[in-house]
Amino acid sequence: MKTYARVVENTVVELFSTDGNMVEMFHPDLLWVDITDITPAPQIDWSANFGTLGWVFSSPEESAPEGTLKTLAKKWLTGLGRQP
């Protein structure tokens, strides 16, 4: 069985697994990409971009922990806001 991701505007919007022929199953205007052998498996809302190396999928960015300098700046600015 193969797994496919439907891509719309560089975003995975649907996942579908089948042993059938995708060309016969869906309208040709729909873009389905075979993701069977891709690890980690792309999920809905992942970005999908086609380039010289083929399809590249990436998960939505998670909020990264704040750096020390950014944390100190926030504390300093908060402290300034409290002064009369």
Image (cartoon, grey):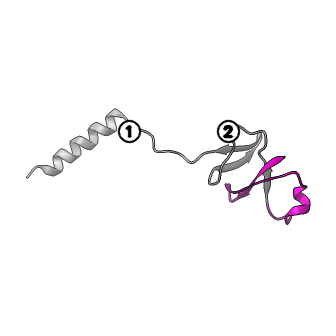
User: Where's residue 49, x and y in %?
Assistant: 70, 48
Q: Which mark is residue 40?
A: 2
The amino acid sitting under disc 2 is: Pro
Asked if labels 1 and 2 touch by Cβ distance under 8 angstroms, the answer is no
Q: Tell me where residue 24 sits by quadrant.
A: bottom right
Query: Where 73 falls versus 31 (above or below)?
Result: above
Is 84 placed left or right of 19 in the picture?
A: left
Q: For the image shown, how many numbered marks are present on the structure?
A: 2
Identify the amino acid type marked 1.
Answer: Glu
Q: Earlier in the sequence, mark 2 or mark 1?
A: 2
Is 21 positioned to the left or the right of 70 in the image? right
Task: Give left or right: position of 61 versus 25.
Answer: left
Q: Position of residue 78 (x, y in %)?
A: 21, 47
Q: Around disc 1, counting alpha carbons within 10 Å, would you say few (fewer than 14), some (14 to 19), or many (20 or more)?
A: few
Locate residue 1, reporting x and y percent. 84, 46
Residue drawn at point x = 88 percent, y = 62 percent: 25
What are the residue bounds of the magenta stretch?
1-30
Q: Give the residue displayed 64% in from the left and 54% down from the top.
A: 44
Q: Any magenta on residue 12?
A: yes
Q: CA distance from mark 2 to mark 1?
A: 26 Å
Kindly indicate the quadrant of the structure image that contains residue 70: top left
Q: Which mark is residue 66?
A: 1
Q: Quadrant of residue 51?
A: top right
Q: Secondary structure at mark 1?
A: loop
Going by the picture, which residue comes out furthest to the top? 68
Question: Which of 48/42 is in front?
Answer: 42
Q: Residues within 10 Å of mark 2 (few under 14, many from 20)?
A: few
Q: Nearer the viewer, residue 56 or 17?
A: 17
The percent coordinates of residue 18 (x first, y second) are 83, 53
Residue under the image location 41 percent in, 38 percent down: 65
SS for callout 2: loop
